[in-house]
Image (cartoon, rainbow, N blue to C red):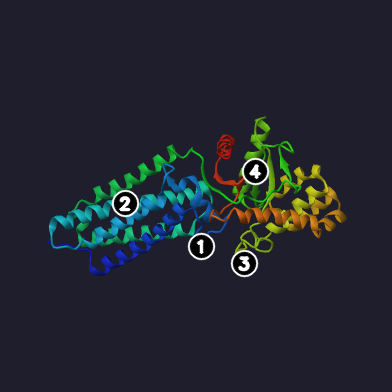
Amino acid sequence: MNKTIGIKSKWALVLLGAIALCLCAVMTAHSFAGTALIGCSAGSGCDYVLSGKWSRFLGIIPVSALAAGAYAAFICTILFIDTEDEETRRISFILATLISGAITGSALWFMSLQLFVIKSFCKYCIAAHSIGIIASILFLVSAIRAGCFRQFHGGKGLLAGISAAVILAIVQILFSGKPAYQEGHSDSGLPDLSLIDLPVIGEPGDTNSVILLYDYGCPHCRRLHELAMDLVSSNSDSPSFILCPTPLCPDCNHYIPADDYRFEYSCDYAKLALSVWICDHKAFEAFDSFIWDTPGVEAARKYAEELVGVDRIADMLGSEELFRTLTACIDLFGRTLEEGKSGLPRIVSGNKWIIPDISTPSDLQSILDLLK
């Protein structure tokens, strides 16, 4: 008997698969190009997810490319699922069931990663995962109602697909220890910040120093800042880190889209931190430690005033020196966007820069070795 899922279900599944395929194809293209997607601006959770170590299988293949292949195969099987040829129809149902299991299992895996491990979300990924789960459920429900699921032993195909997703997760877990990063360089050179007085982690004047661009509201920047401090304190051969506060807020950074206020108070935090540094180098460490908890602008300013004085902070916030220092950091940020590489934190050395996704001081040392 020629059992079929129905013409409406068939074309609904093709449409859902096509939308998911387009989303994955766009993410894959941007992954290979190393550029940011619209809505995934520098330092955003979306940008962090798409550039992190979990975004590539075995550190090479973008997982979005694997997903695109799965959705393309899903569409093909659905197109042949109501053919008159019994054998073709059987193979199509088995493959569609297997792919549905793989899509659902993989979607749940990557959504869990974003929720529990990365703790950041990619709107493109979530959209593709959600559409994939909906399409899989729609197919399975339609197949069960039509009697196809039992006829073609759909349970075995579904289990095989879920098993494939589990294997993918296991492989990613086993090979996720390698530091991931994006890198870029400028043939024309980058701004020289040697004449700008900036905070330093490590030994001031270190000829092997690197520049660390970061935003006080960015949790990934905070992690790298902590790793830099750990590395410097535990390794006498470690280069020092020149701290370059770079607000991801359009109020003072014209490289950020005018409507992007996810880091609303970043300009205030950066100005206060640099003001404390310029007024009193010794007070900076205490303020720097305090401000990472983003206590609010009023509390941050009050603490800055306690450290260096109310009048000195007021004078410095309106000074040319502060403006020149912050502008230099933002200019360096903009110049390292020339090749489309977005995201913070960012480590710059000479005419090269790296946007790392790391979790240990040894990972950071590996990244620094790449800049030599």
Q: Give amino acid for label 1.
A: Ile
Between the residue at mark 3 and the residue at mark 4, the CA separation in whole angstroms equals: 27 Å
The residue mark sitting in front, 3 or 4, is: 3
Q: Give amino acid for label 2.
A: Gly
According to the picture, the residue beneath numbered tag 3 turns out to be: 258
Q: Quadrant of the N terminus?
A: bottom left
What residue appears at the point 39 percent right and 40 percent down from the top-left corner?
Answer: 171
| Position of residue 228 measured from the top left corner of the image (x, y, whole percent) | 64, 39
Q: Which mark is residue 225?
A: 4
| Position of residue 81 measured from the top left corner of the image (x, y, whole percent) | 21, 60
In terms of image quadrants, where is residue 2?
bottom left
Q: Nearer the viewer, residue 362 or 169?
A: 362
In the rendered image, the residue lying farthest to the bottom is 8
Q: Give amino acid for label 3.
A: Ala
Q: In the drawing, does residue 48 fall left or right of residue 350?
A: left
What residue appears at the point 61 percent right and 45 percent down from the top-left corner?
Answer: 347
Q: Which mark is residue 38?
A: 1
According to the picture, the residue beneath numbered tag 2 turns out to be: 101
| Position of residue 50 measured from the top left corner of the image (x, y, whole percent) | 48, 52
Q: Give amino acid for label 4.
A: His
The residue mark sitting in front, 2 or 4, is: 4
Between the residue at mark 1 and the residue at mark 4, the CA separation in whole angstroms equals: 27 Å
| Position of residue 319 measured from the top left corner of the image (x, y, whole percent) | 81, 58
The residue mark sitting in front, 2 or 3, is: 3
In terms of image quadrants, where is residue 92?
bottom left
Q: Residues within 10 Å of mark 2 (few under 14, many from 20)?
A: many
The residue mark sitting in front, 2 or 1, is: 1
- Name which of mark 3 and mark 1 comes first in the sequence: 1
Q: In the drawing, does residue 304 fall left or right of residue 125?
A: right
Between the residue at mark 2 and the residue at mark 3, the CA separation in whole angstroms equals: 42 Å
- Name which of mark 2 and mark 4 comes first in the sequence: 2
Q: Are marks 3 and 4 in contact (CB under 8 Å)?
A: no
